[in-house]
Amino acid sequence: MSTDTTATLPLAPPPGPRPGRAGSTLEAQAVSAWFGTHKVLERVGLAMAANTVTALIGPSGCGKSTFLRILNRMHELVPAAQLAGRVLLDGDDIYDPARRPIDTRRRVGMVFQKPNPFPTMSIYDNVVSGLKLTGRRGLDKDAVVHSALTRAGLWHEVRNRLRQPGGALSGGQQQRLCIARSLAVDPDVLLMDEPCSALDPTSTRRIEDTIAELRDEVTIVIVTHNMQQAQRVSDHCAFFLAAEGTPGHIVESGPTDEVFTDPRDPRTADYVAGRFG
Ligand SMILES: Nc1ncnc2c1ncn2[C@@H]1O[C@H](COP(=O)(O)OP(=O)(O)OP(=O)(O)O)[C@@H](O)[C@H]1O
């Protein structure tokens, strides 16, 4: 790889979705969570089918982000955080003592609310930054960069400036760079915690387009406060609520169309109609 800041990668044809590749199923069973003595989730059960997008919706503080972090073992990094229940990734409990957290985090990637590329690191190095950490050595890095940036919908915008710093990109481009960084380690599941909340409408649409394209190869779980976005991007939807100081729980989950147009629970109807939260 040249150090020329205008360098492009001599690769053709551009890679599309990985052939024969499918996302994984993820299933939470009776998941409860605490921070110290504060119980924030109560026996949450949710099946997230392979190659679907599941949106987690609900008012602030009902435990959506905590639940998301439990799905890739980031919750346990918080001091005094505890949990009960099981999370099955393709049928295997990610909390089995024999399994290493790093293996789960390689298979279950995460994109955060605020784009967080390494700002002084080049675009190229940002994309490959997770490879060593996750034990994926000996790969053709140029091919990984080309593929991950293409799948994140960013390749054509940055192909001529791969050696420029990630921090020089716009907010929306930085978020797609973070998606590319997650994709570079070849995850089966991608968790997204309000990935568009810091972005303008155009950048938001680009990320939503990217989510639609990635559905064929990864299973996606997204937290969003934007009801239109939940309807646009998700196949399934789970409505969380933590009423009056009680721990967060799922009031209702199901196909997104049904949750929005024909909810079973009046609290869901009120929330999706914007009557509270
Ligand atoms: N690191 C932490 N230490 C202690 N309590 C925490 C921590 N993180 C979250 N909490 C608490 O857990 C509860 C659930 O928070 P969480 O961030 O999961 O909710 P949320 O639904 O994602 O909210 P928002 O939509 O505002 O992001 C809240 O009461 C919050 O104060």
Image (cartoon, rainbow, N blue to C red):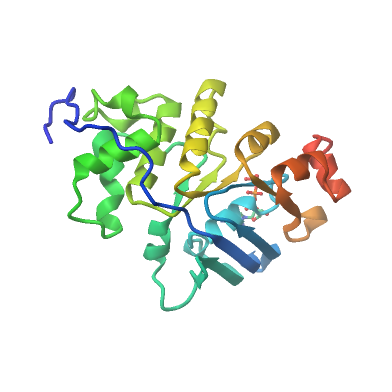
Q: Residue at x 33, y 40 (%)?
A: 148
Q: Quadrant location of the C terminus?
A: top right
Where residue 197 sits, quadrant-wise, is top right
Report x, y in % for residue 55.
63, 45
- Residue at position x 25%, y 32% from top? 13
Question: Whole-percent x and y of residue 249?
Answer: 73, 59
Callout count: 0
Seen from this angle, which residue lies furthest front? 20
Instruction: Name which residue lies at 73% across and 44% down.
Output: 59
Please indicate whether residue 92 sits to the left or right of residue 182 in the image.
right
Asked whether 228 or 235 is in front, the reply is 235
Give above or below for 159 relative to 63.
above
Between residue 105 and residue 33, name the one nearer to us: 105
- Residue 8 vertical position relative to residue 47 in the rendered view, above or below: above
Outermost residue to the right: 266
Rendered residue at 58%/56% (across/down): 49
Answer with left or right where residue 221 lies relative to residue 131. right
Q: Is residue 107 left or right of residue 263?
A: left
Name the image quarter holding the N terminus. Answer: top left
Quadrant of residue 106 in the image? bottom left
x then y, percent, for residue 180? 37, 40
Tell which residue pokes out farthest to the bottom in this image. Answer: 98
Residue 217, percent from left and from top: 44, 47
Whether residue 10 is visible to the viewer of this picture, yes or no, is yes
Can residue 240 be seen in this snapshot?
A: no
